[in-house]
Image (spheres, grey):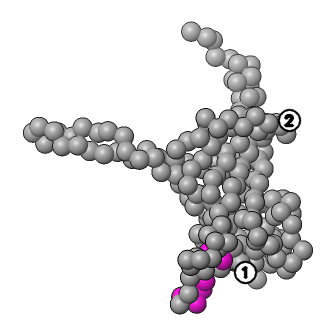
């Protein structure tokens, strides 16, 4: 059994991942334009918080003799992915997400932008990614969210009390599956988590 010393603890903690070292890569679907002067690079820089998405394997309980149940693994599901952004003064980034949502489903409740015959309307998903960085700024692990689309564009809270902060809003995405890559320079198709 190894002797636990302060030096051992410090050495072990020195390789710990830091939650404030991350980058997010947003991509808008083909044919979608960002509002105003907003660029994809600026949108990525305005990301304040993100998370490495979670995953759950469901459980199927199969009845078996005398009320006992056998648990077997069910389907894998992926958690919603919520990202918080700093709002620009022109609200161009938030407007870009609202336009993306409008292309998926209009807000007049009487029409659907995803109608038959409009092939471009069905291209409403994009591949998004979040990368956890090492302390030297190099990628540690990248999680790619395949076929993602926004399902909620959050409110911007306004208050006379908030004099020393910037406005922000959150966007929640749904996606079909996630891949995890240790080195972003080498894409491993076998790493797909489905």
Disc 2: CA contacts within 10 A as few (<14), some (14-19) or many (>=20): few
Quadrant location, the N terminus: top right
Dot 2 lies on which element? loop
Q: Is residue 32 magenta?
A: no
- Residue 120's image quarter? bottom right
Is 107 on the left or on the right of 72, as rendered?
right
Dot 1 lies on which element? loop
- Residue 119's image quarter? bottom right
> Which residue bears the numbered disc 1?
158
- Residue 27's image quarter? bottom right
Q: Is residue 104 magenta?
A: yes
Q: Is residue 49 above or below residue 139?
A: below
> Which residue bears the numbered disc 2?
136
Q: Is residue 64 above or below residue 150?
A: above
| Disc 2 from disc 1: Cα separation | 37 Å
Viewer-closest of 153 and 49: 153
Residue occupying image coordinates x 26% and y 44%: 61
């Amino acid at each position: 059994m190894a002797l636990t010393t302060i030096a051992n603890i410090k050495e072990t903690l020195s390789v710990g991942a830091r939650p404030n070292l991350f980058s997010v890569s947003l991509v808008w679907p083909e044919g979608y334009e960002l509002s105003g002067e907003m660029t994809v690079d600026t949108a990525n820089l305005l990301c304040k918080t993100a998370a490495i998405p979670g995953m759950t394997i469901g459980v199927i309980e199969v009845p078996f003799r005398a009320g006992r149940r056998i648990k077997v693994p069910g389907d894998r599901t992926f958690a919603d992915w919520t990202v918080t952004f700093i709002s620009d003064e022109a609200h161009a980034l938030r407007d870009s997400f609202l336009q993306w949502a409008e292309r998926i489903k209009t807000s007049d409740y009487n029409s659907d932008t995803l109608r038959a015959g409009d092939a471009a309307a069905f291209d409403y998903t994009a591949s998004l990614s979040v990368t956890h960085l090492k302390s030297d700024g190099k990628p540690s692990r990248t999680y790619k969210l395949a076929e993602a689309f926004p399902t909620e564009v959050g409110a911007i809270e306004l208050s006379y009390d908030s004099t020393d902060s910037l406005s922000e809003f959150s966007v929640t995405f749904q996606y079909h599956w996630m891949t995890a890559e240790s080195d972003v320079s080498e894409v491993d198709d076998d790493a797909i988590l489905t």
